Amino acid sequence: MEKFDLIVIGGGPAGYAAAMRGIDYGKRVCLIEKDRVGGAGVYNGALSSKTLWEISQKVASVNDTIGGKGREKFYLSWQDVDATVDEAVFERKFQYSCHLKLLQTETMNKLLSYQRGTASFISPHEIEIVQHDGDRSVVYGENIIIASGSRPRKMNDVNVDEQTIFTSDGIENLSDYPKSLVIVGAGVIGCEYATIFSNFGKTKVYLIDRADRILPFEDTDITNIVSENLEEKGVTIHHNAQLERLENLGNEVEYELSYPDGSREVIRVEKALLSIGRVPNIESLKLENAGVLMSKRGQHIGDDDTVTNVPHIYAVGDVSGRIALVNMGEIEARHAVERAFGTIRERLSYDNVCTIMFLQPEVAAVGLNEMQCIEKNIPVKVVKIDYSVIARAIAMRKTEGFFKIIVTNDSDMKVLGMRAVGEHASTAIQTIGLIMKLGLPIHVIAELVHPHPSIAEGIQECVRMLLNRSLFKSSVFKDKLACYSLVDGVKTPLERL
């Protein structure tokens, strides 16, 4: 039986990161993947869907530019779109493949062993690997990291054939733009796909929203701008809708909705996409043989710092039960390895996680939003600047959006969170993420010399407003700038020159 310092189950973003961090420590690592290295970070997920979004944004931008000039709209064939996505996926896949192959050579001391197959626990330290041809082997690990990822959640009594009714795993099976598409679920992924297909302008999109507004976990100023843009692109949003029936008719999909007033609605579309969350891939792991306990929701039971109830077994990424994002999966994986082999004592913090939603416009977030501050009854100051007064946004002719920074309602004005909506939002948000991570005062941003013109200058102007040093005064540009306190849920404008 071959012995390893570290066994990693799953070669997605989290598992791959764990294996590479183990190599950093000079440890012998066995990486086990049953399908394709890269997982949802490359296939059926982050890279493929975001490539789709980037293409759709370019198409929409061109049409926005020529639309007012009486010119015919620009369209890309689905074959061209599909080919571009395939190129992006192949490029990343090729990098992973070459990297893994070279790491297993003599010159790299053969620290890495890559095994294709399905892994399951025999005991707390022993893993059986069943290869696709049926061959079996057993390996021993001093430490084991579970990074088996997740898959799209499906609905009971719905025939998900990945041809007419899709999950995100099967959307790549499309051979052309659907004439009409219903998306079940108005969370991040559902809204992203609604954005993508409405941007292309070839599909009538319906979005089923159980709540009274999409993205209900975000502030209303964010959800309003996103929903208005979707509706302008022709998306029909079914608010407060309960899905009673979703039926696969072969070449069509029929769905029935009910509403709080007792009314019902039946609609037929060409395709349907389920976007109702994901479930962890743990069924085949035989965790009971290792004594690893999982909750009914599939989350590991441990100390919430990547360690399960078995001290040498860790759970990271989508099976950690925390934030199911590529960046967090990688951070959790690195942290787990550092706990196993390093001297790290500090617990992993989730307070400054930067996220992005690929919508129209893009939305980036870090820390708390206003709604959370009100729910937690945290007194705060809020400052907000519209993109229309940021020079770079004006130059780009992309003036839709805003920056919003939330700080403590005291003289320290410690940053609690930020929301960025608009072009380059995901790049700009990192400044506040770093400030939060290092615990630096907001004065640092006010005094930093930013490149000009840049979107990030809007962050500096936000901070200057809080310090009463801004170029534009919120009391003058009340429709573009805002500076107020939130105490006990009451908004009070802050006096500024």
Image (spheres, helix red, strand yellow):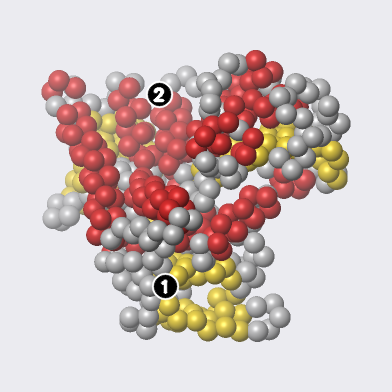
Residue drawn at point x = 53 percent, y = 22 percent: 452
Look at label 2 and name its amino acid.
Answer: Phe
| Viewer can see residue 208 | no
Q: x and y percent of residue 177 in the render?
A: 34, 66
Report the side of 205 relative to 119 (left or right): right
* Mark 1 or mark 2: whose residue is earlier in sequence: 1
**Residue in front for this viewpoint, 264 or 20:** 264
Look at label 1 and name its amino acid.
Answer: Ser
Residue of label 2 = 341
Residue drawn at point x = 81 percent, y = 34 percent: 475
Identify the residue at the far front of this view: 70
Task: State the mark number for residue 389.
Answer: none
Report the side of 88 relative to 199 (left or right): left
SS at mark 1 in the image: strand
Residue drawn at point x = 68 percent, y = 42 percent: 369
Quadrant of the drawing holding the N terminus: top left
Report the side of 65 relative to 212 (left or right): left
Q: CA distance from mark 1 to mark 2?
A: 53 Å
| Viewer can see residue 492 | yes
Q: x and y percent of residue 420 in the render?
A: 59, 39
Quadrant of the drawing holding the C terminus: top right
Q: Residues within 10 Å of mark 1 (few under 14, many from 20)?
A: some
Task: State the mark number for residue 180.
Answer: 1
**Residue in front for this viewpoint, 79 or 74:** 74
Numbered disc total: 2
Give residue 372's quadrant in the image. Answer: top right
Q: Nearer the viewer, mark 1 or mark 2?
A: 1
Report the side of 150 relative to 190 (left or right): left
Q: Residues within 10 Å of mark 2 (few under 14, many from 20)?
A: some
Give residue 132's quadrant in the image. Answer: bottom left
